[in-house]
Image (cartoon, rainbow, N blue to C red):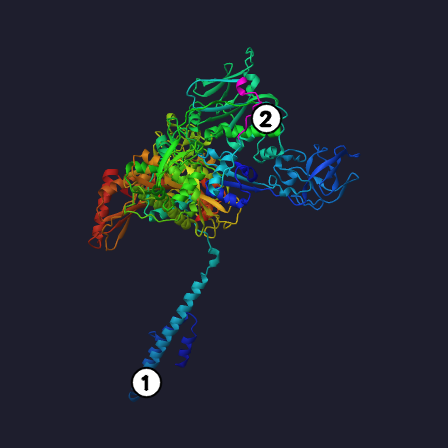
Amino acid sequence: MKEWYEKIQTAISVEDLENIRIAIFGKKGLLAKQFEEMKAVPNEEKANFAKELNTHKNELTSLFNEQKTVLQTKELYEAMKAQALDVSLYSTTSRKGALHPVMETMDRIVEYFSSMSFSVETGPMVEDDFHNFEALNLPKYHPARDMQDTFYFKDEMLLRTHTSPVQIRTMLHTKPPIRMIAPGAVFRRDYDLTHTPMFHQVEGLLVDEEGKVSFANLKYILEDFLKYMFGDVEVRFRPSFFPFTEPSAEVDISCIFCKGHGCRVCSHTGWLEVLGCGIVDPNVFKAVGYEHVSGYAFGLGVERFAMLIHHIGDLRSLFEGDVRLLEQFQ
Amino acid sequence: MIITKSWLNEFINIEDKSADELAKTLNSIGLEVDRVVQYKIPAKIVFGSVLECEKHPDADKLNICKVDVGTAVYQIVCGASNVRKGLHVAVATLGAVMPNGLEIKPVQLRGVDSEGMICSASELGLADASSGILEFDSSIGKIKLGQELCENRYLQDTLIEIELTANRGDCLSIYGVARDLCAAYNRPLLKIADGEDDERRMGIGRILQLTHADDLDVNLRYKAIEIKELKLPFLISLRLSQIEEKQSSELDAFLFYTTYTTGVILRAYDYNFFKISDDAEKKAKISLSLDNLGFATIYAKEKVVSIVGVNQQDCSKMPENEGIAIIEASYIAPHIISKQMAENKIESGPLFYRTSRGSEPTLNIGLNYCIGLFDKNSSSEIYGGSVELCDEYESVLITISVDEINSIIGAKIDKTTITKILQNLGFDISKSQGTNFVILVPRYRHDIVNKQDIVEEIVRLVGIDNIPSKPFVLKEKNPLSSGYFEFKKLRKYRHSAANQGFFETVHFVFNEKAKLQEYGFACIDESLELLNPIVNTLDTMRPTLMLGLLNAASLNVKSGYKDVRLFEIDSVFSSARHESIKMAFIYSGDAYKDGILNGGRSSKMDFGAFVQLVSNVVGDVDLVAYVPEHTLANPYQCAKIMLNNQEIGELFKLHPIVQDAMDLDETFICEIDFSKLSFNLVEAKAYSKYQASFRDLSLVVPNNLTYDEIQRVIKESKSEQIVRFYPVDKYIDQSLGENSSLTLRFVLQSLEKTLEEDDITSNMNAILTALNERLGLILR
């Protein structure tokens, strides 16, 4: 009997164990034989014999089950090992696409102003002289029209040179108070290293009752916005000139590359020009028939923001669809 | 506009201001600084005088000079062609280190000792005034031999280039910038001395007569000068080089220098040109009237001589630097001349830019300055008095209160500060009462016409940095406009496309018309076309995004990408130039990355897989066979895309001819009308909680029958228990002749119960019956 215990314990595979099981527990197996022999045992010893035999049966069964689990597990692991992979072969690069850095920058800008309760407004790219120039205090022959080399169509329509006509359209179809931004493509007839005939702007406008909107308000929101976009930078306002705002200012941030010490990007000035803004000129309100109101407006070039934020050196590369640039934004 | 510190110093005392301070102030008052150049002349370079100058015995081009530098006389060998006895020169003495790093040491040149170097402008890092060595004169102050050049403020100067905004014509001169700085620094403007009329001189009236039409809207003032022995002083030639100006004659240089300094437009005419030969008194006669285009024109003997503010005929100019010249100072209001020029573009001279931006209207400033120059640098005789014509001008009057100013600025600026600023700017506020300012604007500030302009002046001189920021308190108003939802919709689809592996691109909305027409696209009507395209490859507004994407794909293949996946959402234009937004995809090349998974050989993208990607972005789509008008598509793999039974766009395999022409691999393109994509909230439907069953049907289908017809019949005849069906296999074999075998899979499910075999059979039978009756299809 003892040797059977050993046999179970030394079985080397589930198959081997199964053969042992048949040899012990099978119809013609060891136990069956033992029970057969019990018939020949004298009656007074029968109870003991049976008891002993049952104990062996139980012990063998539990030993068998135990050994079976061990062997099954072992075999499972051997099978798994046979399928082992060199996982390091499967290192991979993503096949995700990506959003364009200019569009993504525009989205970030829109999100900021949306959260500051500015509405988002849109307008057509093909505009007329009134919305693009006249209503914005840029009458014909105004020298400032030189600043914006314009694409014209044969029917005297034009491609908007800024997103400001959207302000005019919005003011013409709604009543103050207004708090809006207008993101979109704009066009100037200029094509060289630092100019493309199409680029993107986001323009902002706030209009409220007369005497309510001040230059100090404009300063507040732009300082906050520029810190949101560029992190911890210094913001500087310089008086400037735009026909549609007065007083007007250009806004600089301390150079994000050299921290204001002066480098090639900031032409060694320590400052980067990023925005134009001002108090809305009364002639603009007059053009849309608004009375007793005050307001501020600002505008920025999205490509410039994207190039500064993402350290992109070549403006024209933004319009080429080159995956070598785009895949970096996954 | 380039200015220098010493030049500004003629009109405002800023000796104490460093270059940095000056740049900071200019920026803060709105004169944007583009460039600052600090001239730094090294030590040990001193003023010297050439006592003797003799030819070198062994070298043709060398001279041996004895140069007095006050404390000593050195022998210096000099190669410059302009070196001569008596010159005042710059001497680099022994031990001086030149800007290029060269140290001056005693040397022998062809056997002659030389102890120092006589310097040219470029050797000292100065603007290149002339070739050869510098020839100093008293225009840069009294010359003290031996004094270091770096102590001279005209040489050790600071140059600043500023960028002027279109409204600031008043700062197109040194005098104008100085005037603005006076307000910033609260310092007086140093005036230009009036030229005193010498009684001994003959009056101008004796030689010049002006006749003119009425109401000419121009200001003119004439002086006459008999020019003799004109000599351009060193300082003027130095400064003209600093501002990168070259004038053809000394007289032109004097006039240009005056205009640049004072802002007054000056011209010189040859007196003889106007002289009436048969006039006994030999008087010159200038007549002035409007020409047929409306320009104020100056005539001599009925010939056009010049147009005020625009140009001057060469024949009326002084032929040389001697003789009697009529000097004309002129002013015409910028809005008048700009308008005239915009209406009739005539040829304009170099000064037109100034007149159109607003030149200096106080003509005497320029004339007096000019005469001062002639007095100092020539033996010219100046005729007494002047001949003039004045227009009628009414000053701009603006009334504004302290409170109005402060409410626009959003800060409290007191009356005294405002008063000071306005006075320093030259505004006449003598009529003001209490807290109300009544402001008379000087004529040179033609850009100031309303209250806002006054506030702008206060803001720039107070300094925007000194205005505290204040948050705006807003009234509640729902900002969620249609524009916002359009933005959200764009964002949703852009993200979806990127998540399906497509890269977003942005292209110009311009395309090449010839190319578009070659591919059969309808372009903008000729009458609505772009008038002034920038290049002929961008000469029309695109009707499709596809061309841009194709070009980009081609570019990427050339730079080594085996699979190119791009998309774009932007505007396109119809032939009526109507703008709409489209979304387009392009997929070119491998369907997967090559790598361990496919043994380095990926399969190519195919029609079905491309449709799946597009569908992952835009939703469930049905495709209908279609042949487009353009020739980009392979007509045998081209479809109209339907979304909720509405046509939304097209999807196709690129035509092999185009594919080859653009060096592309298998390429698929899809373009969709973005407005037709949905951005609605989802309405949840009831769904079954019971098990679904699957059944396949293999049908014998004639090859000319498209799946969409089979699909239509099934849709019309199926019960609600068939929740979905789709093709899973198409088997083509010769044994089937003109037919093929199409296997469809049906998903059956009920909202009420688990379907029994009988339910399923009856459903499938109904489908089979319908297909057989309507299309003659049988089971295989």
Q: Nearer the viewer, residue B547 or A248?
A: A248
Please state if B625 lies on the left or on the right of B130 as rendered.
Answer: left
- Residue bearing mark 2: B251
Q: Is residue B196 magenta?
A: yes
Q: Residue furthest left?
A: B752
Chain to which mark 2 belongs:
B
Label annotation for residue B130: none
In percent of width and height, residue B28 lies at: 46, 43
Task: Judge depth for marks 2 and 1 and give the one in front.
Answer: 2
Tell me whether marks 2 and 1 sit on the same chain. no
Q: Is residue B215 magenta?
A: no
In percent of width and height, residue B271 lies at: 56, 19
- Locate residue A139: give its quadrant: top left
In percent of width and height, residue B451 lies at: 36, 37
Q: Residue furthest top?
A: B278
Distance Cα–Cα, label 2 vs label 1: 143 Å
- Residue bearing mark 1: A49
Q: Nearer the viewer, residue A73 or B666?
A: B666
Q: Residue furthest bottom?
A: A44
Q: Secondary structure at mark 2?
A: helix
Q: Amino acid at mark 2?
A: Leu
Q: Residue at x 64, y 35 (%)?
A: B138
Q: Secondary structure at mark 1?
A: helix
In percent of width and height, residue B198 lies at: 56, 25
Q: Quadrant of the N terminus of chain A?
A: bottom left
Q: Amino acid at mark 1?
A: Phe
Q: Residues within 10 Å of mark 2 (few under 14, many from 20)?
A: many
Q: Is residue B744 above or below residue A55?
A: above
> What's drawn in magenta, residue-wise?
B194-207
Q: Is residue A10 above or below residue B249?
A: below
Is residue B587 among what the camera can see?
no
